[in-house]
Amino acid sequence: MTVNYIFKTEPYAHQRTAIGLAGNRAGFAFLMEMGTGKSKSLIDNMAQMHLSNCINFALIIAPKGVYRNWVNKEIPEHLPDNVSHRVIRWVASPNKTQQAEMRRVNQPFDGLTIFVMNVEAFSTLKGQQAGAWFAKVFGRTGLIAIDESTTIKNHSAKRTKALTKIAAGFAYRRILTGSPVTKSPLDIYSQFEFLGPGTLGFQSYYAFQARYALLQRRKMGRTSFNQVVGYHNLEELTQRIDQHGYRVLKSECLDLPEKVYTARYVEMTDHQRKVYDHIAKDGVALLDSGLVTTQQVITQLLRLQQVLSGHLKTDEGDTITFPTNRLGVLKDLLEEHAGKALIWSRFRHDIQQITEALNKTFGEGAAAAYYGDTSDDERARIVANFQNPNHPLRFFVGNPSTGGYGLTLTQADLVIYYANSFDLEHRIQSEDRAHRIGQRNNVTYVDLITEGTIDEKIVDALRNKIEIGAKVLGERAREWLTLSK
């Protein structure tokens, strides 16, 4: 692609390779491990295609926890200023202002229009109709991309079928994922079908399955079915994949920064929002009374954090639980990661719930809890198993005040903060469990954040090395307690 292009942020060597290989190909897969910058690679690819008069519209689709990142961070940070563009975000139940914002897509624009949608919307008729309209109106000079394309790995799911059909109406198609195969090599089929029918050389999923899966006929009562008992010809499958994408691991990127920070966004449920708002108003009333101590403010902030995690401890010491999307976002995040990970939370309830959920999802023994109730013998066993690269223990779920000091946990190159401690030292120490002598890879740190809440304030303070205890003494206490709409 010959275009006089000036990068807004200088790409690393592997990103230059990815952008160059994608070029103006009709279909391409950015198979880049988490933390290697696949989002930037797509943005530069889109910008170059726009400047080369290939596209004037891009539909970017990502999970709920990710798609805000495109609007708030990735596009503003990496899209060159000389590329005239507008960014519009999908809202499923918009207010009048949001409706007006989305309708701007109908207005003529001499530049690149980037429309960002959450992939979950395509499980609804409304989202599918919007996607079909985009394909009809903008498809001939448009690009469609799915970030975390494992969300369409199920070839028989309605969402997968809908998106594959919509993608066929676009001139250019891209998928992005750090781990295209999460459970089975068969996961790859529908992701590459999104890039174009028969991309991997098969006219149906069953032909693909017959080539790469070992099948055994089973009977259950009067019903018989084929069960996958193994796989073969995987070297050939890898070669086919390599023809249509670029795969890179963090261990292969020698010029990456040692630490990479990012966020995943979590939406509150309606019930959480009501409880959160009630507690926040109580906190503001406490400030207005003038009779408030630092500890009282900290207590209110702590209760707000509990609500975001889906539980609340009453004054009587009982724990009330209610639904939260946070655990689902965590599991989606870990589905994308092939290696080991640390998950930190300040709350005992979180640690127990996370460990149970991950063992249920990824197999018994995949996760272990390391907190106050863990015996000394069990602690030693957990660390030894986690540090053994061949042991099935993948997820170390701990409390920073207990596991954040002294341990070497360098088998992890992904660290997730489910619920941050207010303590700056806890944050620094827990980050360094993975980032220390013995770590061979760059480490990615992910904070789970609910927009407009205390999450944003805490993460901002901790990343900027600010002591939170002193911060809430000042005028910002009210700001921290106020729920932003």
Image (tube, rainbow, N blue to C red):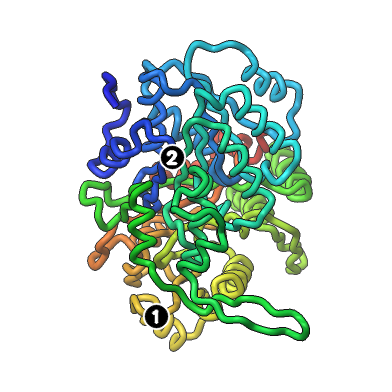
From where the camera sits, is residue 390 visible?
Answer: yes
Give the mark nearest the N terminus, 1 or 2: 2
Residue 109 spot, x, y in % from top left:
54, 12
Query: What type is the residue that disc 2 sits on?
Result: Gly
* Quarter of the rendering occupied by the N terminus: top left
Q: Nearer the viewer, residue 316 or 324?
A: 324
The answer to whether one can see residue 420 in this image is no
Q: Is residue 231 above or below residue 293?
A: below
Relative to the observer, which residue lies in front, 439 or 300?
A: 439
Q: Residues within 10 Å of mark 1 (few under 14, many from 20)?
A: few
Looking at the rendered structure, which numbered label has been put on residue 79? none
Specify whether 403 is left or right of 220: left
Are the residues flagged by discs 1 and 2 in contact, CB closer than 8 Å?
Answer: no
Q: How many marks?
A: 2
**Circle 1 or circle 2, nearest the eye:** 2
Secondary element type, mark 1: loop
Residue shown at 49%/63% (left/top)?
A: 182
Residue lying at 41% horizontally and 67% vertically, measured from the top left: 340
Residue found at x 43% / y 35%:
26
Instruction: Please give the name of the residue rendered at 50% of the width and 62% of the height, measured from the top-left corner.
Output: 208
| x and y percentages locating residue 228 in the rendered image | 55, 75
**In this view, 106 is above or below 306:** above
Residue 226 location in percent, x, y? 61, 76
Q: x, y percentage for residue 249?
A: 31, 55
Nearest the eye: 370 or 52: 52
Residue 27: give its label.
2
Pointer 1 residue = 391
- Side of 24 where 398 appears, left or right: right
